[in-house]
Image (cartoon, rainbow, N blue to C red):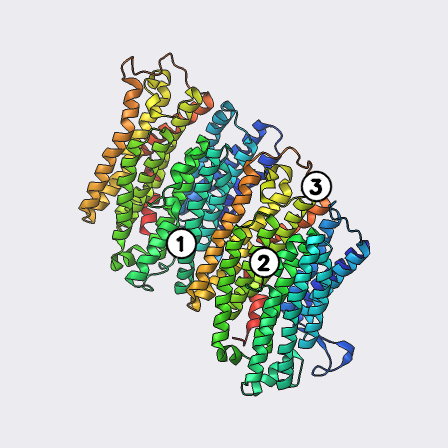
Amino acid sequence: MLISESTLPLLTLLAPLLAVPAILMARNPNIREAFTFLAGFLLLGTLLLMLPGVLAGNTPEIVLFPVIPGAPIALRMDPAGMLFALVASVLWIITTAYAIGYMRTKQEQNQTRFYAFFAVSLFATMGAAMSANLLTLYLFYELLSFSTYPLVGHHQSDEAKSGARKYLTYLVSTSIGLALPALLVTALLSGTLDFGGAPLLAGKVGPSAGAVLLVAFLLGFAKAALMPVHGWLPAAMVAPTPVSALLHAVAVVKVGAFCAVRVVTEVFGMEFLSSLGLGAIITGLAAVTMLVSSFTALTQDGLKRRLAFSTIGQLSYIVLGIGMLNTVAAAGGILHIAMHAFGKITLFFCAGAIYVATGEKYISRMGGIGHRMPLTMLAFLIGSLAIIGVPPTGGFLSKWLLLNGSLLGDHWLLAGVLVVSSLLNAAYFLPIVYKAWFCTPAEAQHTGPMREAPTWCLVPLLGTAALSVGVFFYQETLTTLATMAARF
Amino acid sequence: MPVAISALVFSAACAAVLFMQVLSTGSQTYLLGGWAPPWGISLVVDPLSALMLLVVSVGALLNLVAFSFTPSKWPLRKTPAFLGLYLLATAGHLGIVATGDVFNLFVFIEVAALSSYALLSLGGRRATFASLNYLLVGSVGASLYLLGVGYLYIKSGSLNMLDIARILTTMPLSTTALTGFAVLMLGLWIKMAVFPFHAWLPAAYASASPVTSGLLAPMTTKVMAYVIVRMLITVFPQNFLSAMLGFSSMAVWLACIAIIAGALLAIAQQDLRRMLCFILVAEVGYMLGGAFLGNDTAMTGTILHILADAAMTLTLFMAVGIIVARTGSSRIRDMDGMFTIMPVTMLAFTAGALSMIGVPPFCGFFSKWYLISGALEAGHWVFAGSLILSSLVNVLLFFRVFERAFFRQPSTAAVQGTGNWQQLAPLCFIALLLPAIGLATGGIVQQIIQPALQGVL
C-alpha cells in the first residue's frame, strides 16, 4: 500500500482541517463549498481505506506528541471509533449539500465563517472518534465545544447569544469542573490513560470512589445530555438547522455518548463495573433521562425543540445500552449511535426544509403541510419510524439488540422503560405526520399544490431517509463494528 | 530604536546559543573578574536558567518590535531614555536569572525594579502615582529579601548559592537560618505580587503604556517565581521545608486565596487590561502553590507554568496593547466587533485566552495538569479545587469579551485595516508558540525540569 496503515488516522484527522484555510481563502462561494466536499470525500476515502483492516481486527495507531508520560496525544482507530467516524463523515458530506440549499435560500450572513467552523468541528469529531487515550479524547472534546460555539450563536441575535452562552456554560463548566478532575484522579490512580489495554481503573477503586468517579465522568461529558446536564441541547437549537442537524443530532451529542462508551468500556471495564455493582447508576440516570425527556418532548410546540428533547432521550438509549453491562446490549447501544444519527438528521433536515419553504417553526402551524411538501413529510415519516424503531428502518436493529440485552440481563424494568419510551416516541412524532395529511379543511394551514424546499435541501433529506431504510437491509458492516466494539 | 532592537536580537541569539550549548554539554559557569566562587560573583547557567534567559530575552524583543511599529497615543517622547530603561529592565531580569550569588541577585532585583518604576511612570498622571505605590511596596519587598540574605550570611558566611547550600546541609537547622528563609521568601512574595501584597500590580500595569506592561507583566512575576523555585531547589536544603511545614502549608493556602481572590476581582473589572492584571494575580497563586506543595509533580507544574504563563501573558498583553494603541480604549464594552476590525490580533488573543483557561493543546493546560496532579498527590484538595475554579472563571471572563467581540457589530468610529505586519508578526509568532510549547511539554519536562529537580525534594 502506498500509505502505511498507521498514518491513515492522521490523514483522516487532517482532512477536515486542511479545508479550513481553503474555505477562508476561497473567493467564490461555489469554490468554497467545493473544498468542503473535497475534504469530506477525502475523509471518507481514508476511512474506507482503513475499514477492511479494522474489520479484520487491526487497530492502526500513531503517537503524535508524547506530552505527558502515560498520556501522549495519540490516535488509534478501533471498531467503535470507526463506526462513529464513518457515520459522521458520510453525514458531513450530505449536510454540506443541505447547508448549501439552506444557507443560500435563507441568505444567511457570514457563510464563510460558518463553513470554516463546521470543518473545525468535524476535525474535532474525528479526533474524538480516534482518540487513543482519555487525554486526547478530552482535548478534542474541548475543541469541539469551542469550535461549535460560534456556530450556535451564528445568527448574532440576542436569543442566539444567550443560547450560545448557555451552551458553552453547560459544556465547559461540566468538562472542566467534573470530567477534568475525574481524568486527573484516574491518571493518578492508574498511571496511564491509554485505551485498548486493561481497563484503567479496574481493581484500583472501591465502590464509593468508583461511583463518584463514574458520575463525574458521565455528567462531566455533558455532551451525552444526561439529565440534569441536558439543558444546553434545547438552547443550542437557535443555531442554523444544518448545525442542529449534523452537530446536535450527530457529531457533538454522539461524541458525548461516545465518551460514555469509552468510560464504561475502557476506563472502568464492564466486568469491573458489574463487580462493583455500579451498572445501576448508569442505567438509572439513563432511564430517568429517557422518560422525562420523552414526556417533555410531548409538550414542545417548537419542532426543533421537540427534536432536541427527543435527541436527549435517544442518547440515553446508548448510555442505557452500555450501562446494562452485557455485550448484546452494549452492541445495541453502540449501534444506536449510527441508527439514531440517520433517523434524527432526516428529521432535522425536514424541520429545516419546512422552515425554508414556509417559514414555520411551530408544530401547531403545520396542519396540512403534507399536501404542500409531500416528499419532505414522507421523509419525516421515515425518520420518525427510525427513531421509534419500526422495521424496516435502522432504528429497529439497535432497539432490538437493546431489548434483547435487557432481557438477557434480566433487566425487566429497563425493558419496560425501553418499550414505554418507544411508545412515547411514537406519541410525539406520529401526530405531526398525521396532522400533515389528515386534517379538516378548517384545521389546514397549508394546502397544495406541491411546493417543496429547494432541491439542495430536498435531495439530502431524501438521501438520509433512504439511508435510514438502507441500513436495515445492508447492516452487516455497522453491526459487525458495533459487536466488535462491545466485545473490546 | 534600531540600536535597542539589535541589542535585544543579539541578546536573544546569545540566549538561544547558550540554551543549545547547555542542553548538549551541561551547565556553564562564568566567574566575573575571574574570582573563585565563594568570594567572587559567578554567573551559573543550567538548563532551567538557560530556558528562562531565552524566555526573557525573546519576550522583550518581540514586545519591543511589535510596539515600535504601532502608532500609539503614548508617543515615546523621551525615546532614548525610554529605550535605555527598557534595555536596563531586561538586563536586570536576565541578571536575576543568570546569577549564582544571592547578594548579586539583590542587586539585579534593584536594577530591574528601579528601571521598571521609571518605565511604568512614563504612562501619564495615573501611572506616576501607581508607580510610586509600586516603588514603596517593591522597596519593602527587596529590603526583606536583603534582610533574609543577611541572616543567611550570618549563619553561613557565604553569598554564593551553591556554597550556601553546601554549608547549610552540614549545619544543624538553626532559628537564624529558618528566619532568614522565611523573611527572604516574604520579600520575594511581595515582589511577585502574591495576594494580599498584590495591589501594586494592577495599578501599575494597567495604567502604564502598552509597551511597558507588555514587557513587565510577563517578565517580573515570572522571574520572581523563578527565584523562589531556584531558592527551593538549589539554595535551601530539603529539610528547611520539612522543618517549616506550617510555613509551606501557609504558602499553599495563601496561593489558594490568591487564586480565588484574583479570579473574583477579575470578574469585577470593566477594563480588559485590569482584568488581565487580576488574572495575573491568580496565576501568581498557581506558581506559588505549586512551588510549596512539596512534591516533584507540583514543582514541575510550577516551572512549566512559569514558562507557559510568560508566553500567554505576553500574548494577551501584546494583543490588548495593540488594541489599546490603535483604538485608544481597553474597556470591555468597547470590544464590540473587534474580530471584524482586528481579526489577527483577536485570533492571537483567543489563543492566549484558551491557554489561560487551560484548553489542550495550549501550554496552559499542561502546566495546570501537573499542578493539579501535584495537588492531588499531596492530598491538597482545596488547591486542586481552586485551580479548577480559576479555569472556570477564566472561561467566563474571556467569553464575556468574545461574545462582544465576535457577535456584535463594530461601533462606527472603529479603526479600519488590520495593522501592519511588523506589529502582527511578533504577536502571531508568540501565539503560535503557545500550542507548540504545549505539545513540546514532554521534551521540556524530560530535558530541562527533571534534571533540575534531580536529588531535590
Q: Mark 3 points at which residue?
A: B419
Q: Mark 2 lies on which chain?
A: B
State the SS at label 2: helix
Whole-angstrom CA distance, mark 3 to mark 1, is 41 Å
Q: Mark 2 points at which residue?
A: B309
Measured as percent of width and height from the top left, residue B290 is found at: 51, 66
Rate crowding at label 2 as few (under 14), some (14 to 19) or many (20 or more) other CA atoms within 10 Å: many
What kind of residue is marked 3? Gly
**Is residue B295 at all visible to an observer of this figure?**
no
Whole-angstrom CA distance, mark 2 to mark 3, is 26 Å
State the SS at label 3: loop
At x 46%, y 63%, the residue is B383
Circles 2, 3 touching at the beta carbon (< 8 Å): no
What kind of residue is marked 2? Asp
Residues A168 and B431: in front is A168
- Is residue A268 rendered to the left or right of residue B347? left
Circles 3, 1 touching at the beta carbon (< 8 Å): no
Q: Name the residue under label 1.
A: A178
Q: Which chain carries label 1?
A: A
Residues A253 and A66: in front is A253
- State which quadrant residue B98 falls in: bottom right
Q: Are marks 1 and 2 on the same chain?
A: no
Whole-angstrom CA distance, mark 1 to mark 2, is 24 Å
